[in-house]
Amino acid sequence: MARYPNIGDHGLIGDLQTAALVSTDGTLDWFCCPRFDSPSVFASLLDAVRGGFFQIAPDRDDYVTRQLYLPDTAILVTRFMTPDGVGEVHDFMPAVKGGATGRHRLVRNIRVVRGVMRFALELQPRFDYGRKPHKLEISEHGAMFAADDAELTVHGITPEGTSIKDAGITPERRGDGVRWTRTLREGQIGGVVLEWMGGAPGRVTPEQAQRLADDTAQFWRDWVGRSTYRGRWREMVDRSAITLKLLTYAPTGAPVAAPTTALPEQVGGERNWDYRYTWIRDGSFSIYALLGLGFVEEAAAFGGWLRDRVQEQAGDASGPLKIMYRVDGTSDLVEESLDHFEGWRGSRPVRIGNGAADQLQLDIYGEAADAMYLADQQGVQVAHQGWQAATELIDWLCEHWDQPDEGIWETRGGRKNFTYGRFQAWVALDRAIRLAAARGRPANIVRWTTVRDQVYAQIMERGWNAKIGAFTQHYDTEVLDSSLLMMPLQGFIAPRDPMWLSTLAAMDRELVSDSLVYRYNPAASPDGLRGDEGTFSLCTFWYVDALARSGRLDEARLVFEKMHTYANHLGLYSEEIGSTGEQLGNFPQAFSHLSLISAAVNLDHMLDHGAGSARGVPTAR
């Protein structure tokens, strides 16, 4: 399976409505358009033969390649070094401002910075996950691929007054795609602009291409410059912030969990899910991270999206809220398998859609309420209609909190009395009470307080297992679960309470492997799926925060520093880390980056001011 690059051997580019992955060998191997959750145009990451790709690389084999981002931007530079010269491909997507649009541009700007280099470019799009045939037309300024109502235009980058032929380019049909070569010398610029629904091919001059790059660089530098964070690990924090921004659908403010689908949690396994949607949980945690960096506008945008979901209450089996939605707020997430796709290194099934959308996961109500509470503290207040809808959710939770659910990890092994779900029910009630009291809003505070205290008492009685000296995954097990690392972070228990310190010590023994943290042990707690999984990066960053709050600051810092060694060459993280340090699961993962930000902000503050002085991202103040 050498034809599949490592999951971590990629950089991410995007325009705030969709995104693409580019591998270290210059291959654009994942791109969906016009939205994150649209069908793929390039998907060789999931099927090297049927998926489609666009590679730009030296027309020779003896080269070395490196990747980096232009500082403080989302412009990805893939460098190729040969004995005859050094060339670069600058990949980026100009940011789309305003509402949702069907037109998107992806620039692949080639330049030679030393000597001479002959590049080979091969473009093989495959529309609708490789299921829809297309037509190809080549013209004097580029090419156009058309499949029913979808069009991908290739605009050549050539000097004013010249055609691609004048520039020494002779496109040749290769199967359903096109291939051509181009020789550039030091200081010369070439390449292409791909445009979705862009009409007939037209010339793009090198000067125009450079202006697109300059404007895009300025956009990202202006944006990241708004961050208020000035602490340690700033470069990692800023890269994570840019990554979260790239994963956010700007027209609605909704972040996707990841831009990819079906990248496995275990090579060859079946834990291959579609993450191109917005989870209530992930989005709520993103508010913690964004507010921690001073990005109030982005936090408010998602708060508006969340308010709309609360007001419409479109859930059914899941309760008033669904656990996930499409970026536009719709919820048609029927799960299906792309049986014609091989899967990354044979990892099947290749799933699109997500059958967990209707699961009952009671924790989402706590995460949503905590996000509303934290946003309120930063001046993003809930309007009247939003508050009315929120009180309906809390009243519903008062009636339904005491029942089994599927849990935070969306296991498919049946409902259980998950401790994390109960604990988040407590969070929901606690934050709603605080909001009502602080803002003088109408609410049944007496009832909410009574139920909140009942939830607390039940967790302390049934969630605590005296035999093993720890809070457990659910009430009928001795299995540990790292989601409970959130208990001290959100104020449910004091970080130095003996019961919590005992739980943390048990996690040290059972879930931590050389600083990396597993979610739980699938062998001990069957989750309805075959196979195993790697350590979960989100949980490792939660572990950092929990260690610091419990007074183990030196350990927390070491774990955090070690975690940096598991990032890819660009500072990006997938969902999980494998046994030899490889990235596993969908990539890059918003969960991993938002938790990195929160851990950095809190740990930095505690290193300066002492354990227990966290700034509250996330926490209850």
Image (cartoon, grey):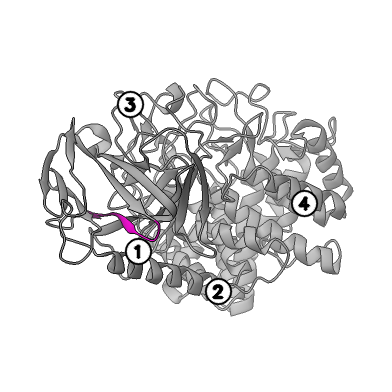
Question: Circle 1 sits in a helix, a strand or a loop, which is it?
Answer: loop
Looking at the rendered structure, the kind of residue marked 3 is Phe
Q: CA distance from mark 3 to mark 1?
A: 31 Å
Looking at the rendered structure, the kind of residue marked 1 is Pro
**Residue 276 in view of the camera:** no
For the N terminus, give its image quadrant.
top left
Q: Are marks 2 and 3 in contact (CB under 8 Å)?
A: no
Q: Residue at x 35, y 28 (%)?
A: 48
- The picture places residue 211, in percent across and down from the top left corner, at 34, 70
Q: Nearest the camera: 342 or 409?
A: 342
Number of the label disc, if any, that sits on residue 546:
4
Residue 187 magenta-drawn? yes
Q: Earlier in the sequence, mark 2 or mark 3?
A: 2
Q: Nearest the camera: 501 or 560?
A: 560
Segment colored magenta: 186-196
Residue 1 magenta-drawn? no
